[in-house]
Image (spheres, rainbow, N blue to C red):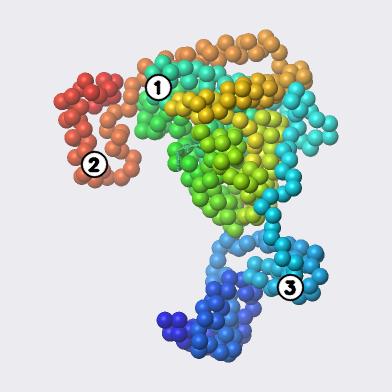
Amino acid sequence: MATIWLRRSRTIAQSLKHKYGLTGILGLEGCNSFQNLHASSPSSTNHDRHLLVSTYKYSTTIVSDKRLKSTVALKHLDSTAFASDSDDEQALDFPGGMVSYTSEMQFISESQEKRIPCYRVLDDNGEIINGSDLELVSKEVAVKMYNDMVTLQMMDNIFYEAQRQGRISFYLTSMGEEAISIASAAALSTEDYILPQYREPGVLLWRGFTIQEFANQLFGNKADYGKGRQMPIHYGSNKLNYITISSPIATQLPQAVGVAYSLKMDKKDACVVTYTGDGGTSEGDFHAALNFAAVTDAPVVFICRNNGWAISTNVSEQFRSDGVVVKGQAYGVRSIRVDGNDALAVYSAIHSARKTAISEERPVLVEALTYRVGHHSTSDDSTKYRPVDEIEYWKSARNPVNRFRNWVESNGWWSDTEETELRSSLKKQLLQAIQAAEKTEKPPVSDLFSDVYDVTPSNLREQENQLRETINKYPQDYPSDVPV
Ligand SMILES: Cc1ncc(C[n+]2csc(CCOP(=O)(O)OP(=O)(O)O)c2C)c(N)n1
Ligand SMILES: [Mg+2]
């Protein structure tokens, strides 16, 4: 098989040589498999080898001419970095870049001596640490950030209670992680696309999704953009460039790279921001996404909310590496570790990451250290697998909302009176939104069968008729508020 193929290649090489009259002009990137195949052939000669390499060079030239400019790698490993610490004068001219030799047999250590530090700007009391490298936040932005954090807290308390009362079937809070979603959203443009996991409703809130819109989705009523077909908390908004949440963990990550790549091809002044939890980084999709983003130079910011837990799995069982941040470098992705409970640090880091993603056309990985103060969801009781003291410590001593409030207050931008007014107004709005959402009609049964096919296929029409017949026959077993 290999011999036939080699003969064919030789013929092609000869005809190309005849046609173009020159031997390879490009480098040898990517030719190792070609050479390996050739080397394994017993009948190969030096002449064949030369010819094959030439063939490869011709075809690369032709293919790369046709390639879209946006697929051409702009950045390579620093070619000056390879020989700096080697006494061997020879070096390996390897596809993808030069590699120096060493006669010292040294395995790369599985860990660094010191853990990667965590960037923060506000100390535990909410005071700016002298000499901090930060992006300034105006009064208007800071007050909105704080307002939205409190709104998220209140939404979580009241919607969580609504689930406990059996009014909605499921809920999931952002408790303890309010700073990550709100501060990152504040640092972005609304033109940037969001591909969330599920603990980032704060981004929607920042972009103007109303309390009523949240309630409509949770109650799956007629006003819900998903027409009640998604489970509660799977929000989405076309208008706000927020791609609908889906439960299979980490699927949003490679999708985000695709979206980012398309923004780059369209030369948009925007990036994609995608979120994952620490648990999400154990999915293959996380690794595929980082690599895919690196090689396509896609303008995407990966934000990992490392909150210590993936339901009952602690991070110490999740990975042996120094968290998530170190994984970026292995894929050639610039990375930073941030204190996820310091809103100003998150804001500054994301502001800078966005700039890098767009102006340098490259991905960035941000690991935000935080803690999931709430249960995983309403289907979980986290006191079964973690100490209550640990939860309490993060809820009070490391609370991101209180810490940010201290800073906003110290600037004279917030007061106790404003706090009381905000909380009581939010409570009213939330209760009204729940009542209105509850009263709004449910989407009709026919909506279960629409929006997938342009023309509904006959098997689906049959199923729809069957469902109607069954509901009419056993009405007591079906919700009475769904129009049949
Ligand atoms: C592919 C897949 N596997 C398993 C699950 C079940 N599951 C839902 S959430 C979750 C934990 C995710 O943890 P993490 O990514 O750390 O996010 P967090 O809940 O801590 O915000 C798991 C295992 C799922 N939804 N999808
Ligand atoms: Mg987690």
Q: Identify the residue under disc 1.
A: 168
Q: How many marks?
A: 3
**Amino acid under disc 2:** Leu
Q: Is residue 3 left or right of residue 420?
A: left
Which mark, by number, is residue 460? 2
Across and down, in percent, residue 411 comes to: 77, 20
Which of the pair 325/271 is nearer the observer? 325
**Quadrant where the N terminus lies?**
bottom left
Q: Which is more N-terminal, label 2 or label 1?
A: 1
Q: Residue 224's quadrant in the figure?
A: top left
Residue at position x 64%, y 78% from top?
25
Q: Residue 480's quadrant in the figure?
A: top left
Across and down, in percent, residue 282 comes to: 53, 46
Q: Secondary structure at mark 3?
A: strand
Across and down, in percent, residue 378 comes to: 45, 25
Disc 3 residue: CB within 8 Å of ligand 1: no
